[in-house]
Amino acid sequence: KAGVTQTPRYLIKTRGQQVTLSCSPISGHRSVSWYQQTPGQGLQFLFEYFSETQRNKGNFPGRFSGRQFSNSRSEMNVSTLELGDSALYLCASSFAPGEEYNEQFFGPGTRLTVL
Amino acid sequence: AQKITQTQPGMFVQEKEAVTLDCTYDTSDQSYGLFWYKQPSSGEMIFLIYQGSYDEQNATEGRYSLNFQKARKSANLVISASQLGDSAMYFCAMREFDYKLSFGAGTTVTVRA
């Protein structure tokens, strides 16, 4: 069974540009969550999607957005990039939210560098 | 307030010995879940072990065991018989009612031969 895949793995952008990251969950998983990992702030929750609907959102500015498609694949977009957006962006998938035990399987991440 | 506290930024352990990674949490929820993940230098988060708030037995998964002390709000990870491949960053995380995962700052474990 294929794991969570994220593309691209590495990305270099300049300030002011926008970027779109993609995440394909494990087959059968319908919930996708996104996290940002930086040395200073650690791992922070961005948002979670289930059945094409955003169920939860972390404390990030509106420049961060996402969506989920009918096949459960998800994309996140960051507009007007800032230097501080440089981070490892991790995607995690699970069967569905709302269960007491709901293991999230993480992808390898996309490392974004903003110059 | 921090929901997950990991007080050990880094630890060294001799191969084949056991190591305990500390984790304390803060929640007012009655139902919650506690997770430990391993993150090698490659960046991928690898699930290790889960403990539900209502589970009476401590969780075990192979060489990993979770020492769950609910009254003290602690969920320490014990890695037995350490191997060189255990060298990585370890994160404690908690899921509360809103299903978001809150992570601690992590502990770097270095296993020495």
Image: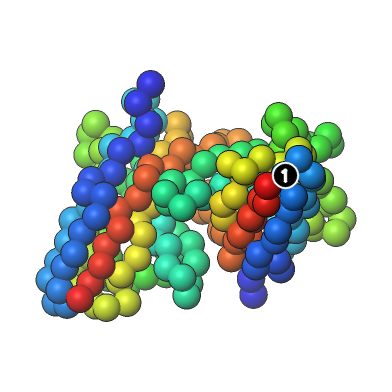
Q: Residue at x 85, y 59 (%)?
A: B72
Nearer to me, A41 or A113: A113
Work out which quarter of the rendered image holds the N terminus of chain B and state it.
bottom right
Nearer to me, A41 or A60: A41
Q: Identify the residue position indicated by label 1 in the image.
A: B15
Q: Position of residue A43 (x, y in %)?
A: 48, 62
Question: Looking at the image, what colour scheme do you see?
Answer: rainbow
Q: Is residue A25 left or right of residue B83?
A: left
Q: Residue furthest top?
A: A1
Nearer to me, B96 or B9: B9
Nearer to me, A58 or B66: B66
Quadrant housing residue A4: top left
Q: Position of residue A20 (x, y in %)?
A: 18, 56
Residue B52, above or below B92? above
The local secondary structure at tag 1 comes to loop
Please give the chain letter of the residue carrying mark 1.
Answer: B
Number of dots carrying numbers: 1
Three-letter amino acid code of the residue under disc 1: Glu
Q: Position of residue A62 (x, y in %)?
A: 27, 70
Quadrant housing residue B16: top right
Q: Residue at x 70, y 66 (%)?
A: B8
